[in-house]
Amino acid sequence: MDLSFSEADRRFQSELRDWLATAWPEEVRRRQARSALGKLTKEDHVRWQKALAAKGWAAVNWPKEHGGAEFTPTQKYIFDLERARVGAPGVVPFGMTMVAPVIMKFGTAAQKRKYLPDILASNVWWCQGYSEPGAGSDLASLKTKAEDRGDHYLVNGVKTWTTMAQYADMMFCLVRTSQESIRQMGISFLLIDMKSPGISVNPIITLDQPSEGHQEINMVYFQDVEVPKENLVGEEGKGWTCAKYLLEFERGNAYSPALKGALAHVRAMASREADGNGKRLATDASFKARIDDVEVQILALEFTELRILGALAAGQNVGPESSLLKTRGTELQQAVTELAMETNGYYANPFDASEPVAGDNFKPIGPAYANGVAQDYFNTRKVSIYAGSNEIQRNIMAKLVLGLG
C-alpha cells in the first residue's frame, strides 16, 4: 500500500497553499480570532464560499458537469489538511455537500437546473429538516405530515435541532406522506421554501451561546404550509432512500486534518499557560503524556483514513469503515476540546459584556487564544450523536465487521 502523495498531488498542495495565503489572509484570521466565540458571520461564510467557487474549488466532490472540482480522494484530503493548517473553514455543508448530491442522483432535470447553480454560487442558504421531538436517532418514527392536495402538499409538524434555520432560504425535509406497516415506507423528501406562510423558527439557546446573536440551532414549526408538488425529490414514499444516500455524505469526512490543527493549537496554548505552581503546562509530564496519547490516536486515525483513500482511489467502495471513522473521529474531537478546556482553565469561559458581543468589539477576558474554547467544548458534545449516534455506528460495525447480531 503506497501512502505517499504523487508529484501531481504535491503540485496541487503547493498551488493550494499559495492560494490560501491570499484568499484567507492573516488579517481575516485575526478578525475571526477577535470575534465573539471566534465565529464567522453568515456574510463571512458566503464571501469565502464565493471565493472558492470562483477558483472552482467550492464543490470538491461534485462532477465537473455541474461545475464541481471533482477532486480525487487524495486531493480532497490535501484540501482539508491545508485548510486546517491556516484555520480556513470548510463550506457550510447543508447545500453543497448534503442536498446537492441528492438532487443530482434523484432530482429531475428541472430541479437540477433550478437549484444546483445557486447552491454552487452560495446564493441560497439551506438547512436540514430531519430530526423531530421523539424522532432523532429513531428517525423513521418522524410524524411531520405532508397531505396531498392536488398540485401541492400541505405540511404540518415540527423539526428540531435545525442548524442555522434562522438564516436559511430553503430546507430539505423528510415528511410522512402515508402510513405504512414498515415505518421507513411512506416517507418523502421535500424541498421547502423557508419564506412560505405558516413556517416559524424559534431559537434553542444552548450552553455554548451566551447571546442570541450567536445562537445556532432551532425548532421549526409548520402550520398548513403549502409546498408545490414539483419540490418532491424522487418518488413519493421513497424519501428514506434519499435520506440514507445523504447520510453517506454527512458521515464521509476525513477528521484527522482538522484534529491535527486543533491539537497543534492546544500545544501552543500549553506552552503559554501555567499550572497552579507556575510551571508551563507544556513541561508538565502528566499533561504532556495526555497530549501525546491523543496525538498518537490522531495519527492512527490519519493512517486509517489514508488507507481508505487508497481504496477509494483504486475504485473500491467503503462500507463499515465510514462508521469507524465517524466514531473515532468524533471521540477525538471531544478529547481535543477537553484538553483545550483544561489548558485555559478559567480563561476559557468568561465574556466581557461591557461591549456588544459582535465583531471586533468583543473583548475576551484573558488571552485572545482562549476565545471560544469553552464554547467549542460544549458544542462538540453533540458530534457523537448527530449523523447516527456512535452507539448506532458500533452496532453497524458489530454486524458488518464482526458478524454479530
Image: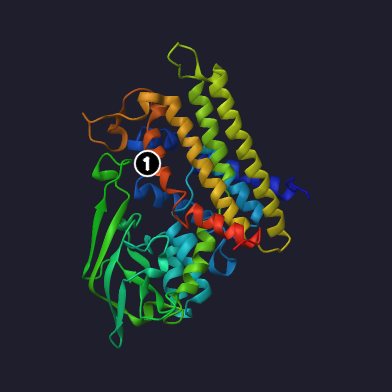
Q: Nearer the viewer, residue 234 or 238?
A: 238
User: Image height check: is 64 above or below 280?
Assistant: below
Residue 6 location (% of width, % of height): 75, 48
Residue 193 location (% of width, % of height): 31, 69
Q: Along the horizontal axis of the image, is 224 left or right of 373?
A: left
Question: Which residue is at a point 51% across and 36% down the rendered structure image?
Answer: 262
Residue 201 location (% of width, % of height): 24, 59
View extreme (front): residue: 405
Residue 190 location (% of width, % of height): 38, 74
Q: Amino acid at mark 1?
A: Lys
User: Image height check: is 236 above or below 140?
Assistant: below
Q: Which residue has dot 1 on it?
A: 39
Tell me where residue 135 sits by quadrant: bottom left
View extreme (top): residue: 277
Question: Which residue is at a point 28% across and 86% down the rendered structure image?
Answer: 149
Q: Nearer the viewer, residue 323 or 40?
A: 323
Question: Which residue is at a point 39% across and 37% down the rendered structure image?
Answer: 32
Q: Residues within 10 Å of mark 1 (few under 14, many from 20)?
A: some
